[in-house]
Image (spheres, rainbow, N blue to C red):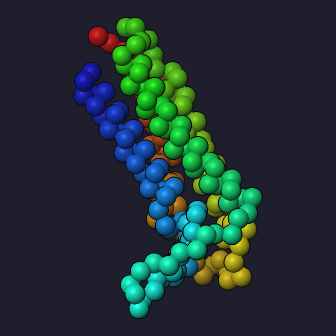
Amino acid sequence: MVLLLISITVLHLVTLAMLLIATLEKSWWVWTDSEITDLWHNCFHDNDTNTWLCATTSESDWLQAVQALMVLSVVFSSISFLVFLGQLLTLSKGVLFYFTGFCQAFAGFTDFSACLIFTFHREEILNDSRDVSKGRFGFCFILAWLCLPLLLISAVLYVHLRKKQ
């Protein structure tokens, strides 16, 4: 039982870290190796100073939806973890961790929605005169997609997890 709790906790913390990286890091769309776009900034690499120069992205309704959904995903996953720790101490023997599982599932669904919106509305989100076919999805976008099955697996594990002494 201890090994199961440790592995669920590690899975949850790894997923939460991946969500934070996907939300805050600079690579949702890559135009070239020296020009990238994320949820918050458009950045390009200055070879003279060897630094990234970033400007705030132009706001669109789709971009705001993706930003809000990714932040909600991080918030619900964090709440889920805190509730899990609280339930470990307060639940009576034999009770299931339903609320923790539902919070984690909701984090997965908000992550899924954000990824879908970015996938299908990237032209409006990127709001650029360049051809979108010349760019590619960055590692943060892929990381956000990878979080989806991990969030849903941990949600199912929480719903089926029964507290024992």
Residue drawn at (43%, 29%), measured in percent from left and top? 82
Examine the rendering and report whether any part of residue 116 can be seen.
Answer: no
Q: Is residue 26 above or below residue 81?
A: below
Residue drawn at (54%, 31%), measured in percent from left and top? 103
Query: Closest to the observer: 37 or 48?
Result: 48
Query: Closest to the observer: 37 or 112?
Result: 37
Q: Is residue 13 above or below residue 59?
A: above
Q: Position of residue 85 (x, y in %)?
A: 38, 25
Examine the rendering and report whether any part of residue 63 can be seen.
Answer: yes
Could you tell me how many numbered marks the image carries? 0
Residue drawn at (55%, 43%), measured in percent from left and top? 73
> In the image, is 131 to the left or to the right of 95?
right
Q: Quadrant of the C terminus?
A: top left
Q: Position of residue 27 (x, y in %)?
A: 50, 67
Q: Position of residue 138 (x, y in %)?
A: 50, 68
Q: Position of residue 150 (x, y in %)?
A: 44, 43
Q: Quarter of the image holding residue 1?
A: top left
Residue drawn at (44%, 56%), measured in percent from left and top? 21
The extreme left residue here reads: 3
> In the image, is 87 to the left or to the right of 28?
left
Q: Is residue 9 above or below residue 163?
A: below
